[in-house]
């Protein structure tokens, strides 16, 4: 007998209550937070979909592992467990722990890059771009053509544009320290990259003598999509597919707050002996000794277990399905989202949903505020508040106005998702009432974190 319902592949041993608020309380909280969801107290949020980074639930095995943490300064037993776990997944030679993904980026980039160089990627994540630009390196995004059409359904919208990569490596020969591929493509809607695309990108890099680095934060979700969607891959395990993905790379940077299933941690892994030695020296300056790299022994234990659990097929099936489940409900109700649903998040196309709100009044930001007031749901704007300000201080509307609903790992159940869908459908039915917002005060860089906003007209929702 084959039953078709995909269930949460765990039962719950410890519960954390969530706090219910009234609509009036949330409207007041939003005003107190200057219409900026980053400034809310988390206690005032019912379902928190701000990010999937470090917000997951650990397993009983991980908590048990933490009690075995060896807190020795150098050569701790926990380091060797961690190192073996990362090597098993990646096959890479040198494994360097860091406190999170951006530390791995900073250490690799400041060791391997110099000002005036160019680094191509399918799409640079914001910390990746910022760490390169801080060194005077140009971060170039080479998305495949399908990636820029939100409503287009295609299996691998995370792919790097191979022809553009070849051109970039030819044109800038000698000025590219390495190329990168981000799996899955977070800034591009959580879309996966095909195994064939990584293989061909790797071959191009070899031809040009340039190393390939994977930004591998969601390597397990990417491997699952390959198993589901790429011809000839369905019989393989996610671990086997992941190992092949890494075999095409010379190194990787990882935020273990995603597919490491931990609340804090990351690593840098490299094959090049000389580069790894330099990175370790750089690590000692800011992160710590190479066998702990800014993490406690117990963090390394939890990560070693997490890397094993994340490749479990029942976990990955549930994970990707729970996001697609919401996507299906929204699509059926006519709510415009980036298609197909990503591995870790649903992205609502706010420009399509609120055509009456001009881009200068930040439709995605306004929509995320409305979702909070009506349903206590916290999402994040990925639009013109986040990306509109140019380095020269001028404003340019973002390419897309998206509201991202990111799913923490193993935290919410199907009834939470059902509630979420109900909130989204209700707000969609009330969309004509939603008005735009305006910036009142904003810092020049990364303004979305701290900006103050207010309704552009009398109120956020007309009555
Ligand atoms: C989260 C993330 C990073 C940065 O990792 P942190 O742990 O937040 O420092 C880098 N790249 C991608 C694709 C990410 O999603």
Image (cartoon, rainbow, N blue to C red):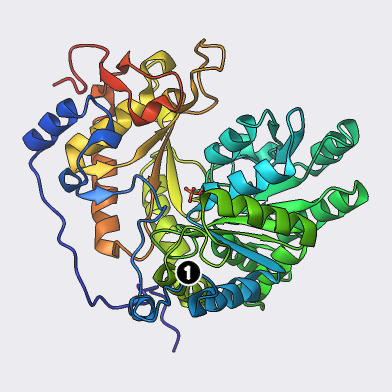
- Tell me where residue 222 appears, x and y as whole percent: 59, 60
Camera-side residue of 193 and 250: 250
Q: Which residue is depicted at the point 87% across and 49% down?
A: 204
Using the image, determine if residue 92 lies above or below residue 10: above
The answer to whether residue 147 is left or right of residue 17 is right
Camera-side residue of 45 and 460: 45
Camera-side residue of 397 and 425: 397
Q: Which residue is depicted at the point 7% across and 41% down?
A: 22
Using the image, determine if residue 144 lies above or below residue 181: above
- Residue 57, quarter of picture: bottom left
The answer to whether residue 321 is left or right of residue 423 is right
- Tell me where residue 190 appears, x and y as whole percent: 53, 49
Camera-side residue of 96 and 254: 96
Task: Classify 10 Å Cα crowding around label 1: few (below 14), some (14-19), many (20 and above).
Answer: few
Q: Is residue 48 visible?
A: yes
- Tell me where residue 402 appears, x and y as whole percent: 44, 33
Q: Which residue is depicted at the point 52% across and 15% down?
A: 396
How many numbered tags mark residues here?
1
The quarter of the rendered structure image containing the N terminus is bottom left
The answer to whether residue 421 is left or right of residue 230 is left
Using the image, determine if residue 322 lies above or below residue 148: below
The answer to whether residue 380 is left or right of residue 175 is left
Q: Is residue 231 visible?
A: no
- Residue 137, quarter of picture: top right
Q: Which residue is mark 1?
A: 73
The quarter of the rendered structure image containing the C terminus is top left
- Tell me where residue 7 appears, x and y as whole percent: 36, 74
State the SS at label 1: loop
């Amino acid at each position: 007998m084959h039953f078709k319902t995909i269930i949460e592949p765990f039962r719950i041993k410890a519960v954390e209550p969530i706090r219910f608020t009234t609509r009036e309380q949330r409207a007041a909280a939003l005003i107190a937070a200057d219409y900026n969801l980053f400034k809310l107290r988390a206690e005032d949020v019912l379902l928190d979909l701000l990010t999937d980074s470090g917000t997951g639930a650990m397993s009983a095995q991980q908590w048990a592992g933490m009690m075995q943490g060896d807190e020795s300064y150098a050569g701790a037993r926990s380091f060797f467990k961690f190192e073996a776990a990362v090597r098993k997944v990646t096959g890479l030679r040198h494994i360097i722990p860091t406190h999170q993904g951006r530390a791995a980026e900073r250490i690799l980039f400041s060791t391997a890059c110099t000002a005036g160089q160019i680094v191509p990627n399918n799409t640079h994540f914001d910390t990746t771009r910022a760490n390169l630009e801080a060194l005077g390196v140009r971060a170039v995004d080479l998305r495949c053509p399908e990636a820029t059409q939100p409503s287009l359904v295609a299996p691998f919208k995370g792919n790097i544009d191979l022809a553009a990569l070849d051109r970039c490596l030819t044109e800038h020969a000698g000025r590219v320290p390495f190329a990168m591929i981000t799996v899955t493509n977070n800034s591009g809607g959580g879309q996966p990259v095909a195994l064939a695309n990584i293989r061909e990108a790797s071959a191009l890099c070899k031809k040009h003598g340039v190393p390939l680095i994977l930004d591998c934060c969601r390597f397990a979700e990417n491997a699952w999509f390959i198993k589901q969607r790429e011809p000839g891959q369905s019989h393989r395990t996610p671990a086997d597919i992941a190992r092949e993905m890494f075999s095409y790379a010379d190194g990787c940077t990882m935020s273990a707050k995603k597919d490491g299933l931990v609340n804090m941690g990351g690593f840098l892994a490299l094959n090049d002996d000389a580069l790894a030695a330099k990175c370790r020296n750089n690590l000692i300056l800011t992160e710590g000794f190479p066998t702990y790299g800014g993490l406690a022994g117990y963090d390394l234990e939890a990560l070693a277990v997490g890397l094993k659990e994340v490749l479990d097929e029942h976990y990955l099936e549930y994970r990707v399905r729970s996001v697609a489940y919401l996507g299906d409900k929204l699509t059926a109700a006519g709510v415009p989202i980036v298609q197909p649903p990503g591995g870790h998040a649903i992205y609502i196309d706010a420009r399509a949903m609120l055509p009456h709100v001009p881009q200068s009044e930040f439709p995605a930001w306004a929509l995320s505020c409305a979702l909070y007031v009506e349903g206590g749901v916290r999402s994040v704007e990925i639009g013109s508040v986040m990306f509109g300000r140019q380095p020269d201080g001028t404003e340019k509307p973002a390419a897309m106005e998206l509201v991202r609903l990111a799913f923490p790992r193993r935290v919410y159940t199907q009834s939470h998702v059902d509630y979420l869908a109900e909130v989204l459908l209700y707000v969609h039915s009330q969309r004509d009432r939603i008005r735009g917002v305006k910036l009142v005060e904003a810092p020049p860089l990364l303004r979305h974190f701290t900006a103050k906003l207010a309704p552009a007209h009398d109120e956020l929702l007309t009555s």
